[in-house]
Amino acid sequence: MDRPPHRSSLTRQLVLPVVMLLLAAVLANVAGAAWLAARRSAEAARRQQAQVAAALAASRVALSMPVLDALHRLTGSHFIVWNEAARSHGISTFPAETLATLGADSIAAGIAARALDVGGQRHQIGVARSEGVRPEAVLVLSPQRAILATTLEGTWPVLAVAAATLAVLVPLGLRTTGVLARRIGAVERHVGRIAEGEFGTQLVDPAGRAGAAGDELSRLVGGVNRMSATLGDLRASLVAGERQRLLGQLAAGFAHELRNATTGARLAIDLHRRRCPQEQSVAAADDSLQVAVRQLAILEEEVRGLLALGKPTEALRGLLSVDQLLGDVRDLTAPRCEHAGVHMDCELPTGLTVVGRHDSLRAALVNLALNGIDAAGRDGRVRLRGTATGNRVELAVEDTGPGPPEAIRAALGEPFVTGKPEGIGLGLTVARAVAEEHGGALDWGRAHGRTRFAISLPAQRLGELAAAAPSGRES
């Protein structure tokens, strides 16, 4: 069987998109928070510069270093008094050595760009005008580092929450999808085995819960198990049906040849009797011809059993007396018992009745009785019994033999399974086929040193079908 091409794992398909979506959401939140923080910081700087400009414009105090230092401590911004006409600076809150590095052109360019690098740090520049005793322009320089710090202050909670969320969700997602992937992988492998012909096997889902409380995957496992069991039963039925068909064809061929042989033997005996009437007195003292006729009768019963494995008989079923049935089996097998040195017991009367075909059931019981005689051996015992248990009637053959060999006990009833060196393994197959045809079953067991084979059939009282059923004997 060709294996499907390699596909990415379910864990990767589930976890990776979730993690990517979560990262995208985190980045979007961080970007939004940073933009809002930067905007608020810039707005705050502008408001601060506007407030300082308004304060300077309203102030009537001359700008001096103490005043500028006080403003620097209050706002965190630096101040430079700027002469626009002369393009030169005056007093400033910057240190003198820092201010010395700045040229008038640099300050003028910074005013135009509204940003200036002072001492390696970027500052935003705002221009305020003092309306005091000596009107002057004042440059308000707000360090951008404060803006970045404000931005970080606005974004780090989002980053912390995102990091904690990822730290929890990623392992949890990996674990959850890993369990789910293993369960789905087990179902996939099980379905693959079913596709390769391993019917009847059952998959156990340890992570699922049985019953209605189970999840969808548990119910899927249950459905696959039912499908596997059904396919196993169907295959067994197909195999058994095909084997039964082939066995029926083979048995029908054997039965045809055996029937021709037994018919010829009976005709020869009848012809001998007619041609040699003077030997009748001798035959009265010697029952060898009668024994031969009874042996032919047994052979005919076995032929009927083989025919039961072929096409179903068209004879009608009827009410059958169990006493008459067991008595016929006893009479047919009595010569074999006498020859083998086996004592047979037949427990009569039973007063039981079954519905079925007399000749088919008799042939099945004859097969069981012959097997019991062979198993019991010389000085052994065989017993024919009919018992009722509930709504079932059991037609049983018990013997004192050792029972079937251990190696074949599990396959008893299968065609060509036998423990006899000279056997062909069709006797129990015939009995089982007849039992199943009558809606019953063939069972066996060992108890108290005896082997017991029983055909279990539905019970029937003597008056229930008397008006509707024929006699039930086959021609």
Image (cartoon, rainbow, N blue to C red):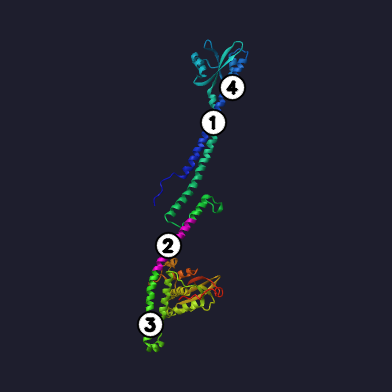
Q: Which residue is mark 2?
A: 239
Q: Which residue is mark 1?
A: 32
Foreground pick, 267 / 161:
267
Residue 73: tell me if it is visible: no
SS under mark 3: helix
Identify which amino acid the numbered label 1 is placed on: Gly
For residue 269, the mark is: 3
Answer whether labels 3 and 4 touch (C-beta < 8 Å).
no
Where residue 141 appears, as percent x and y from the top left, is 54, 19
Q: Which residue is mark 4?
A: 47
Residue 47 inside the magenta-drawn segment: no
What residue appears at the point 45 percent right and 62 percent down from the top-left corner?
Answer: 237
What residue appears at the point 46 percent right and 60 percent down from the top-left corner?
Answer: 234
Q: Nearer the viewer, mark 2 or mark 1?
A: 2
Say whether disc 2 or disc 3 marks the residue closer to the N-terminus: 2
Where residue 324 appears, as percent x and y from the top left, is 50, 78
State the CA–CA distance, disc 3 to disc 1.
Answer: 115 Å
Say whether disc 2 or disc 1 marks the residue closer to the N-terminus: 1
**In which image quadrant can residue 413 be found?**
bottom left
**In which image quadrant can residue 279 be found?**
bottom left
Say whether disc 4 or disc 2 marks the residue closer to the N-terminus: 4
State the CA–CA distance, disc 2 to disc 3.
Answer: 44 Å
User: Dot 2, how many residues are within 10 Å of its Cα: few (below 14), some (14-19), or many (20+)?
Assistant: few
